[in-house]
């Protein structure tokens, strides 16, 4: 069993000994003294690697130093490739689990990340199974929600002291924790959006309104937040992660349903104040229902824009967002790509969360929900 993180003599968060592994190095360091006891095996070149075996910590949140870590990322979509690449560029030893055509493409061309006109080519190992990355100290699961059960057993069988779930597990949260172990599970959610081009390269951008969210209440939450901070992306430590994930399900179900059911999709909403008002009203009603079931709306800013400010103001705001990168780059491509796979499950889960207390939301989302979901 993995023990929870402990506090070192300097008050920083470290990790307790894992009975099946030794030499675990992930933790927060208060100085930049090289971590001489940790070698990154098999990494041919790249930032943070010292052929002599002396690997300096890398900058994390607030300028504090985080030890170089060995990481396995399961999933080679936008989220998996982007975080694998950013962590590798930060100096960590990263393997990415990919299969089929995507694996062939990555072995041939590697990860290619485009952001704001700049391109990087981070160095990551490509492996077919998580078992090939058996030395991983951190496993990051970055697959779509409907794919989570297919990789859950593999993640549970890994020896990694920390398993990070980067998907919204929808109704599978408790099952994931039970299989993997609650003491080593950390739920997070990405702060980037984007798409994979025909040539396999990833075009991404950071979402200004949503940093990378990390479960602050998890045993290894502090260590994962520090690790994520080495990517230079903004990180938020969320103390009510279950509520955050439920809020996110309802929010994405509403916005995604609007994309799928409005003529011309997101641009169509951006041109119609009335359609924007309908969407704001439906999601505000859903948040009322969610709160009525005892779920706080997280982050609080969503409760403000859906239900606290005047509807005309919120409609104008969301018209702009449907015409901008928040919806057109961060949300709509994923919704369209998963309209027959993951998104119907997101919609069905959101409907189950609000119950029958949100008729306008149900009317908006029901056409997109998984077949068989009762009205």
Image (cartoon, rainbow, N blue to C red):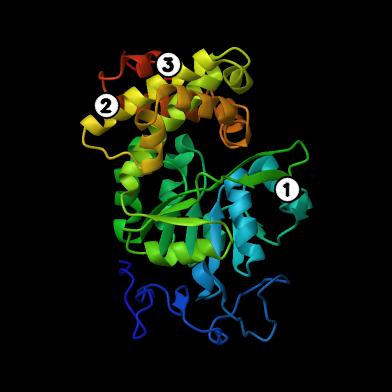
Q: Secondary structure at mark 3?
A: helix
Label 1 crowd bin: few (<14), some (14–19), many (20+), radius 10 Å: few
Residue 340 higher or lower than 39, as above or below: above
- Mark pair 1, 2: CA separation: 39 Å
Question: Of callouts 2 and 3, which one flags the residue occurring earlier in the amino acid sequence?
Answer: 2
Report the residue marked by disc 1.
Answer: 116
Label 3 crowd bin: few (<14), some (14–19), many (20+), radius 10 Å: many
Q: Secondary structure at mark 1?
A: loop
| Numbered tag placed on residue 131 in the rendering | none
Residue occupying the point 50% across, 70% down: 62
Q: Quadrant of the N terminus?
A: bottom left
The answer to whether residue 135 shows anywhere in this view is no
- Mark pair 2, 3: CA separation: 15 Å
Label 2 crowd bin: few (<14), some (14–19), many (20+), radius 10 Å: some
Residue occupying the point 41% across, 57% down: 157
Asked if labels 2 and 1 touch by Cβ distance under 8 angstroms, the answer is no
Could you tell me residue 301's position as x and y percent?
A: 40, 41
Residue 350 higher or lower than 49, as above or below: above
Q: Quadrant of the C terminus?
A: top left
**Quarter of image, res 162:** bottom left
Q: Of 304 and 205, which appears nearest the observer? A: 304
Could you tell me residue 176's position as x and y percent?
A: 35, 47
Question: Of callouts 3 and 1, which one flags the residue occurring earlier in the amino acid sequence?
Answer: 1
- Mark pair 3, 1: CA separation: 34 Å
| Numbered tag placed on residue 289 in the rendering | 2
Q: Of 44 and 315, which appears nearest the observer? A: 315
The answer to whether residue 163 shows anywhere in this view is yes
Could you tell me residue 315's position as x and y percent?
A: 48, 23
Report the residue marked by disc 3.
Answer: 364
Residue 182 higher or lower than 45, as above or below: above
């Amino acid at each position: 069993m993995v023990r929870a993180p402990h506090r070192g003599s300097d008050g920083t968060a470290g990790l307790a000994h894992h009975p099946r592994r030794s030499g675990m190095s992930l933790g927060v360091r208060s100085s930049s003294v090289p971590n001489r006891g940790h070698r990154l095996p098999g990494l041919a070149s790249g930032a943070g690697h010292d052929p002599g075996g002396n690997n300096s910590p890398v900058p994390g949140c607030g300028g504090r130093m985080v030890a170089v870590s060995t990481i396995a990322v399961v999933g080679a979509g936008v989220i998996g490739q982007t975080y694998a690449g950013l962590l590798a560029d930060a100096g960590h030893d990263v393997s990415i689990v990919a299969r089929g055509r995507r694996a062939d493409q990555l072995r041939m061309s590697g990860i290619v990340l485009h952001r704001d006109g700049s391109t990087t080519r981070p160095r990551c190992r490509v492996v077919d199974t998580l078992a090939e990355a058996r030395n991983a100290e951190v496993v990051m699961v970055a697959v779509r929600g409907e794919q989570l059960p297919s990789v859950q057993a593999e993640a549970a069988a890994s020896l990694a002291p920390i398993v990070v779930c980067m998907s919204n597990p929808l109704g599978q949260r408790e099952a994931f924790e039970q299989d993997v172990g609650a003491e080593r599970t950390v739920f997070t959610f990405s702060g980037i959006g984007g798409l994979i081009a025909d040539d396999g390269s990833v075009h991404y951008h950071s979402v200004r309104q949503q940093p990378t969210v990390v479960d602050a209440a998890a045993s290894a939450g502090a260590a994962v937040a520090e690790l994520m901070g080495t990517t230079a992306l903004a990180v938020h430590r969320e103390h009510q992660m279950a509520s955050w994930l439920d809020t996110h399900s309802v929010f994405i179900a509403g916005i995604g349903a609007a994309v799928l059911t409005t003529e011309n999709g997101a641009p169509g909403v951006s041109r119609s104040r009335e359609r924007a008002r309908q969407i704001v009203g439906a999601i505000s009603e859903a948040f009322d229902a969610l709160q009525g079931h005892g779920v706080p709306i997280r982050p609080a800013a969503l409760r403000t824009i859906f239900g606290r400010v005047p509807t005309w103001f919120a409609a104008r705001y969301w018209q702009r967002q449907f015409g901008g990168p928040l919806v057109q780059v961060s949300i709509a491509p994923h919704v369209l790509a998963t309209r027959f796979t993951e998104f119907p499950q997101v919609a069905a889960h959101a409907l189950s969360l609000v119950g029958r207390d949100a008729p306008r939301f149900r009317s908006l989302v029901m056409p997109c929900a998984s077949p068989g979901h009762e009205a």
